[in-house]
Image (cartoon, coloured by chain):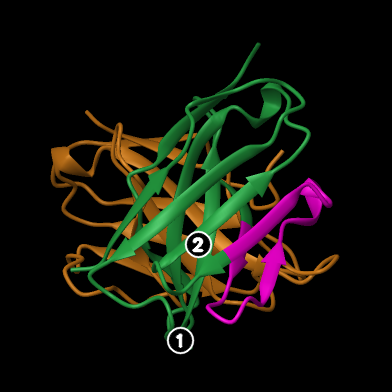
């Protein structure tokens, strides 16, 4: 059971927009920024969004992030076939001695 | 371009110690703006943070792994390492090393990962 809650799956057709949610609590998302990672099949995760809504250099602006209270969202516009991947949210959690926590991941299918 | 590469045995016997090393190339490990971390992913499952270490040896680790984790850094070799003791089949996973950039508060560079199987 992951500390951060994501829907297990999402889907859309090419050109559509999709959104993936990430729900946490007052000890993680409520206090700290949220990051999003994209994991293409058989590869290592790649940083997609950091500090809630910032894109690293090279990440298309089709990807955007937002945070409100203890929840965050990743939005993908103009869906492309190469966006088919697993997406994970992550945040620092203040409980116990402090540690990074991840969502369980959302598998995005481009129909 | 920064690169991270995990190395170590792919098979570990139950109750034995899992040992992995991450070699950093294309950049220095001794910058104060970075921590160096380990994250694992059991087959077909999600990501779990194991722990992180700074170049000076300051560590944080996942409390769920209790005292089984030891992290170390060798600045002369631009490497950092993970030891996980008392392994069980539940420790079978792909193990990734990654750079935590404090300005981003995120893991911005990842190794390709190495599968470690715990089995007799």
Local crowd size for mark 1, using a 10 Å CA cut-off: few (<14), some (14–19), many (≥20):
some
Residue that mark 2 sits on:
B80
Q: Residue furthest front?
A: B76
**Proximity of marks 1 and 2: CB atoms separated by less than 8 Å:** no
Magenta highlight range = B51-72
Residue B101 in the image: x percent, y percent?
Answer: 43, 77
- Can you tell which chain is drawn green? B
Residue that mark 1 sits on:
B33
Among the 4 quarters of the image, the one containing residue B53: bottom right
Q: Is residue B14 above or below residue B49?
A: above
Which residue does the image show at 71% across and 61% down from the upper left? B61
Secondary structure, mark 1, is loop
Q: Colour of chain A?
A: orange
Q: Nearer the viewer, residue B52 or A80?
A: B52
Chain of residue at mark 1: B
Q: Nearer the viewer, residue B97 or B71?
A: B71
Whether residue A71 is visible to the viewer of this picture, yes or no, is: no
């Amino acid at each position: 059971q992951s500390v951060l809650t994501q829907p297990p799956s999402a889907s859309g057709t090419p050109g559509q927009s999709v959104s993936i949610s990430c729900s946490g609590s007052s000890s993680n998302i409520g206090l700290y920024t949220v990051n999003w990672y994209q994991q293409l099949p058989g590869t290592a995760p790649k940083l997609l969004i950091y500090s809630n809504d910032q894109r690293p250099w090279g990440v298309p602006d089709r990807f955007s992030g937002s945070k409100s209270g203890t929840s965050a969202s990743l939005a993908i516009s103009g869906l492309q076939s190469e966006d088919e991947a697993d997406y994970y949210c992550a945040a620092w959690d203040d409980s116990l001695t402090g540690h990074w926590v991840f969502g369980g991941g959302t598998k995005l299918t481009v129909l | 371009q920064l690169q991270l590469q995990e190395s170590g045995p792919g098979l570990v016997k139950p109750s034995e110690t899992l040992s992995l090393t991450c070699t950093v190339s294309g950049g220095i490990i001794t910058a104060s703006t970075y921590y160096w971390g380990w994250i694992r992913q059991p087959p077909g499952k999600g990501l779990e943070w194991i722990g992180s270490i700074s170049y000076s040896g300051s560590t944080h680790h996942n409390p769920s792994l209790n005292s089984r984790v030891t992290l170390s850094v060798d600045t002369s070799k631009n490497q950092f390492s993970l030891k996980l003791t008392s392994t069980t089949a539940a420790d079978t996973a792909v193990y990734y090393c990654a750079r935590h950039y404090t300005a981003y508060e995120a893991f911005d560079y990842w190794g390709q990962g190495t599968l470690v199987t715990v089995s007799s």
